[in-house]
Amino acid sequence: MGRDRARIAQAAARLIAEHGLVDWSLAKRKAAHQLMLPANVALPGNDEIEQALIEFHALYGGAAHAAGLRVQREVALEWMRRLEAWSPRLVGGVAAGWAGAHSDIRIELVADDPKVVEIALAGDRVDYVAGGAPGDRRGARTAELLVETRAGGVRLTILAPEDRRQRPRDDSPRLSIPALAALIGAFYY
């Protein structure tokens, strides 16, 4: 059964990387279907998909993937500096290194009121699309804003201060401005 999970993870990673699927559950189900596995087969976890994406980009992405990831990280650093007042952290695939051309740059911000961030963006004449929900599965109150840039979408998730402090521990990178600047070899300021 572990072999099927690995095959599904690899096929799902290919679908995500090549076709820009953002719904990983759908990618897993499509991959299982393509591999002609039964509908009740055990699907891999998201951590297995992330590892398969890293392997996929290492095998097929090469210098082009590294260059694209660098551009995404540079754009992330620009936005993080711009939004420094809200303690930005780069999260997700761009931080971890498995992001592809279709991946959004994900930045978490902390604000007592998400409207403050929206007002700042509007004041800078930044076009954005508001989204998000009043709460996620842990009960955290979040708001999301999506800004389109030269490197694709920048997804800003705005958390209440207590929600960032109470977040469950995981191994996912959460890069601050200095950490991201060091990673890409840029000057902090």
Image (cartoon, rainbow, N blue to C red):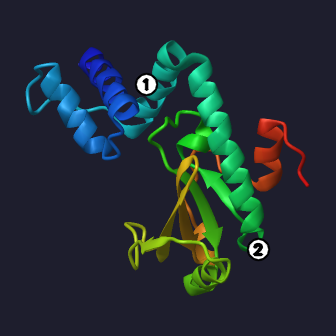
**Is there CB contact under 8 Å for labels 1 and 2?**
no
Residue shown at 66% from the left, 50% from the top: 174
Q: Quadrant of the N terminus?
A: top left
Q: Is residue 53 left or right of residue 45?
A: right
- Mark found first going from the N terminus, 1 or 2: 1
Q: Is residue 45 left or right of residue 117?
A: left
**Residue 128 at x, y = what percent?**
50, 71
**Residue 114 at x, y = what percent?**
56, 81
Q: 10 Å neighbourhood of mark 1: few (<14), some, or many (≥20)?
A: many
Q: Amino acid at mark 2?
A: Ala
Q: Quadrant of the C terminus?
A: bottom right
- Relative vertical location of residue 72 with respect to residue 125 in this rendering, above or below: above
Residue shown at 58% from the left, 49% from the top: 150
Q: Amino acid at mark 1?
A: Ala
**Residue 45 at x, y = what percent?**
35, 37
**Residue 166 at x, y = what percent?**
58, 68
Q: 10 Å neighbourhood of mark 2: few (<14), some, or many (≥20)?
A: few
What's the distance in space between the residues labelled 1 and 2, CA to CA? Answer: 35 Å
What secondary structure is found at the residue carrying circle 2? helix
In the image, which disc is placed on residue 52? 1
What secondary structure is found at the residue carrying circle 1? helix
Q: Quadrant of residue 67?
A: top right
Q: Nearer the viewer, mark 1 or mark 2?
A: 2
In the image, which disc is placed on residue 38? none
In the image, which disc is placed on residue 85? 2
Residue shown at 84% from the left, 36% from the top: 185
